[in-house]
């Protein structure tokens, strides 16, 4: 694991950790964490599990802290400035591989990730866990149905059976609006996926390889 720093287009210095695979990376990935005002950071177990899984499948993986979180500079942007952080992370991790880039996000990070992907063609696929659909937080609304139907890249939604912030029925409706979306509901868990981190990571890893046209031997 290598500690890295990189800078956004509006001059904010962000901290991250880069994990490389054993061989030459076939692809790259950026991981986006949960809400920073509720303890979210790059160091959550679900993101550790996804980082390890993707690295084992040949990805160079960058996990980072959004602006205003832990050692990153700047201040919290309400989900409206954080897409700039994702764009900068994509810049950094694509220096590790000429292959395609996956962006994965959990909760708040999933909201930020999809908004960046709408504008950023470098995002070849999205993996969104616990995508927030019911909340009292001042963060951007999900994309409109028109925006979702126009999005043609692969998207994976992962939710917990008992997720109060991302109810399975609403998640099914959302995923049905996206032409290349897949949905996985993990039984016996909620928004936090406690004790199901490895299963969630395996789902993300298998999707990433399939969606990006890779093989485990690449």
Image (cartoon, rainbow, N blue to C red):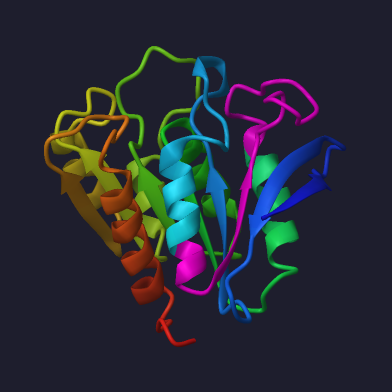
Looking at the image, residue 97 sits to the left or right of residue 187; the answer is right
Q: Residue at x 57, y 31 (%)?
A: 41
Nearer to us in this view, 69 or 90: 69
Looking at the image, residue 192 sits to the left or right of residue 75; the answer is left
In the rendered view, tell whether residue 40 sits above or below residue 149. above
Point out residue 69 in the picture as x, y percentages from the top left corner.
Answer: 67, 25
Q: Which residue is situated farthest in the right direction here? A: 11
In the rendered view, tell whether residue 47 sits above or below residue 135. below
Quadrant in which residue 168 is drawn: top left
Can I make out residue 158 in this image?
A: yes
What's drawn in magenta, residue-wise? Answer: 54-82
What number of labels is visible?
Answer: 0
Q: Which residue is situated farthest in the top direction here? A: 136
Q: Which residue is situated farthest in the bottom direction here? A: 217
Quadrant in which residue 193 is drawn: top left
Looking at the image, residue 131 sits to the left or right of residue 84; the answer is left
Q: Residue at x 76, y 31 (%)?
A: 72
Nearer to us in this view, 2 or 155: 2
Point out residue 131 in the picture as x, y percentages from the top left corner.
Answer: 35, 37
Q: Main secondary structure of the magenta part?
A: loop
> In the rendered image, which quarter contains the N terminus?
bottom right
Point out residue 20 in the picture as x, y percentages from the top left corner.
Answer: 63, 66
Q: Residue at x 20, y 52 (%)?
A: 184
Quadrant in which residue 15 is drawn: top right
Q: Residue at x 44, y 38 (%)?
A: 45
Point out residue 85 in the picture as x, y percentages from the top left corner.
Answer: 69, 41
Looking at the image, residue 212 sits to the left or right of residue 2; the answer is left
Can I make out residue 125 in this image?
A: no
Q: Is 158 contained in the magenta span?
A: no
């Amino acid at each position: 694991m290598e500690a890295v720093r990189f800078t956004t287009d509006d001059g904010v210095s962000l901290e991250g950790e880069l994990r490389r695979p054993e061989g030459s990376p076939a692809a790259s990935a950026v991981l986006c964490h949960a809400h920073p005002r509720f303890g979210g950071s790059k160091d959550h177990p679900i993101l550790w599990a996804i980082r390890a899984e993707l690295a084992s499948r040949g990805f160079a993986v960058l996990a980072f802290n959004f602006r205003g979180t832990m050692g990153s500079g700047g201040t919290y942007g309400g989900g409206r400035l954080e897409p700039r952080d994702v764009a900068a992370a994509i810049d950094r991790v694509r220096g590790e591989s000429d292959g395609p880039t996956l962006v994965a996000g959990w909760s708040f990070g999933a909201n930020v990730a999809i908004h960046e992907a709408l504008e950023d063609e470098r995002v070849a696929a999205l993996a969104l866990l616990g995508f927030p659909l019911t909340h009292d937080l001042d963060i951007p609304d999900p994309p409109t149905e028109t925006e979702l139907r126009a999005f043609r890249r692969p998207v994976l939604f992962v939710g917990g059976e008992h997720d109060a912030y991302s109810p399975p029925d609403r998640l099914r409706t959302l995923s049905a609006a996206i032409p290349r979306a897949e949905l996985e509901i993990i039984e016996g868990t909620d928004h936090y996926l406690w004790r199901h981190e490895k299963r969630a990571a395996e789902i993300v890893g298998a999707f990433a390889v399939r969606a990006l046209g890779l093989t485990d031997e690449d």
